[in-house]
Image: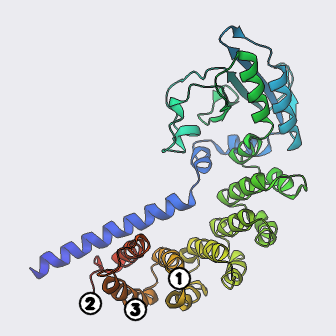
């Protein structure tokens, strides 16, 4: 029996280690990074340096092809704002081809391996049959499997009206930022982030992309963005600093832990949770443990999740104590928050001993 228990313990430990490893890989690897891994070093270098774009725009309605000029102008203006040079003539020198197919009724062309619906498993893009523009790009003779879709969600109308609505959407959609991130060009995103005219929703998008790119050069502006008066911008910046994973992000987020704003406090915890397993010798774990007993349940849930990403055994005694308290409270409290905390504690403790039953 003892031998069997030892074997089972080893299996649990191995399985937990695999889950933790996969979880960290999933948390740290963005879809764009995964795609670029399939490129040669020379191709990656060309993507990073891409500046001249040949733009191929097609407009389709129920009556056939239509004039793509307004669509092309909208796309050109947005890409030029990021510093790209747009080439219309294929004979002219260019680094990449960007194709934009805009349709009154979207044609489904089958599933894609990445981009669009593949990067958002819960989003049934393939079921959309209304007006849409689909973005793809080509490097040399190879079409990337990356895809981005821009929709006009107005009720079905005539072809010209649908294309007009799509043109309006292209003036606001973040497609230029997504392309720059896909090609590994954080400098262009930083320029857009610092533009006074950049809207708050676009700043949120830019900050999130810079975090997912692990853009170390974005740390100074993101450290300022956590003070932004727009809550969404500030909270996204805190999480992005954690995603970047650099040691220089730690002091900023530890300072944010003192925030009196609950949402900002939670964002700082999420950011620190991403940094904790990367910097086990720093003050992240003690700082989170210090706040664990006194915080509301919503904050406790995030702290437990953050601590559960580490293999620091200092978390065991306080998490087990909290777990005993939660187990006792759950007999008379069936709230969704308490159940969520109970689940988070179970996951965090299972990586150490394979069980989270009360002692």
| Residue 104, quarter of picture | top right
Between 64 and 12, the residue placed more toward the observer is 64
- In this rendering, the answer to whether 254 lies above or below 56 is below
Local crowd size for mark 1, using a 10 Å CA cut-off: few (<14), some (14–19), many (≥20) = few
Label 2–label 1 contact, CB within 8 A:
no
Task: Please give the name of the residue rendered at 47% of the width and 78% of the height, measured from the top-left corner.
Answer: 304
Which image quadrant: the N terminus?
bottom left
Q: Give the image location of residue 299, x and y in percent.
A: 54, 78
Q: Is 162 displayed left or right of 108 in the figure?
A: right
The residue carrying mark 2 is 359
Q: Give the image location of residue 344, x and y in percent.
A: 41, 73
Describe the element under mark 2 as helix, strand or loop.
Answer: loop
Local crowd size for mark 2, using a 10 Å CA cut-off: few (<14), some (14–19), many (≥20) = few
Disc 2 and disc 1: Cα gap in Å? 24 Å
The residue carrying mark 3 is 317
Task: Please give the name of the residue rendered at 50% of the width and 60% of the height, measured from the top-left corner.
Answer: 25
Which of pointers 1 and 3 indicates the residue nearer the eye? 1
How was the colour assigned to the protein in this rendering?
A: rainbow
């Amino acid at each position: 029996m003892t031998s069997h228990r030892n074997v089972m313990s080893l299996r649990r430990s191995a399985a937990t280690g695999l889950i933790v490893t996969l979880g960290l890989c999933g948390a740290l690897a963005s879809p764009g990074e995964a795609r670029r891994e399939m490129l040669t070093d020379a191709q990656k270098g060309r993507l990073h340096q891409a500046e001249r774009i040949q733009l191929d725009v097609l407009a389709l309605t129920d009556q056939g092809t239509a004039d793509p000029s307004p669509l092309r102008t909208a796309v050109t203006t947005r890409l030029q704002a990021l510093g790209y040079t747009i080439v219309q003539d294929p004979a002219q020198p260019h680094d990449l081809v960007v194709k934009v197919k805009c349709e009154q009724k979207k044609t489904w062309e089958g599933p894609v391996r990445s981009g669009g619906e593949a990067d958002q498993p819960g989003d049934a893009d393939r079921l959309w049959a209304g007006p849409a523009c689909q973005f793809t790009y080509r490097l040399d003779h190879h079409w990337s499997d990356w895809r981005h879709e821009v929709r006009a969600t107005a009720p079905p109308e005539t072809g010209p009206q649908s294309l007009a609505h799509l043109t309006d959407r292209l003036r606001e959609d973040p497609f230029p930022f997504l392309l720059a991130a896909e090609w590994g060009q954080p400098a262009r995103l930083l320029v857009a982030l610092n533009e006074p005219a950049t809207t708050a929703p676009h700043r949120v998008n830019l900050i999130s992309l810079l975090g997912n790119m692990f853009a170390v050069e974005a740390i100074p502006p993101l450290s300022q963005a956590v003070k932004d008066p727009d809550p969404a911008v500030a909270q996204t910046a805190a999480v992005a600093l954690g995603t970047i994973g650099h040691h220089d992000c730690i002091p900023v987020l530890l300072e944010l832990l003192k925030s009196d704003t609950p949402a900002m406090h939670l964002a700082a915890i999420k950011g620190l949770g991403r940094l904790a397993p990367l910097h086990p010798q720093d003050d992240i774990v003690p700082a989170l443990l210090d706040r664990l007993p006194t915080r509301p349940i919503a904050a406790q849930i995030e702290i437990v999740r953050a601590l559960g990403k580490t293999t620091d055994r200092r978390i065991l005694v306080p998490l087990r104590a909290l777990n005993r308290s939660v187990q006792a409270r759950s007999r008379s409290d069936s709230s969704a928050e308490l159940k969520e905390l109970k689940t988070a504690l179970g996951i965090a403790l299972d990586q150490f001993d394979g069980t989270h039953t009360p002692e």
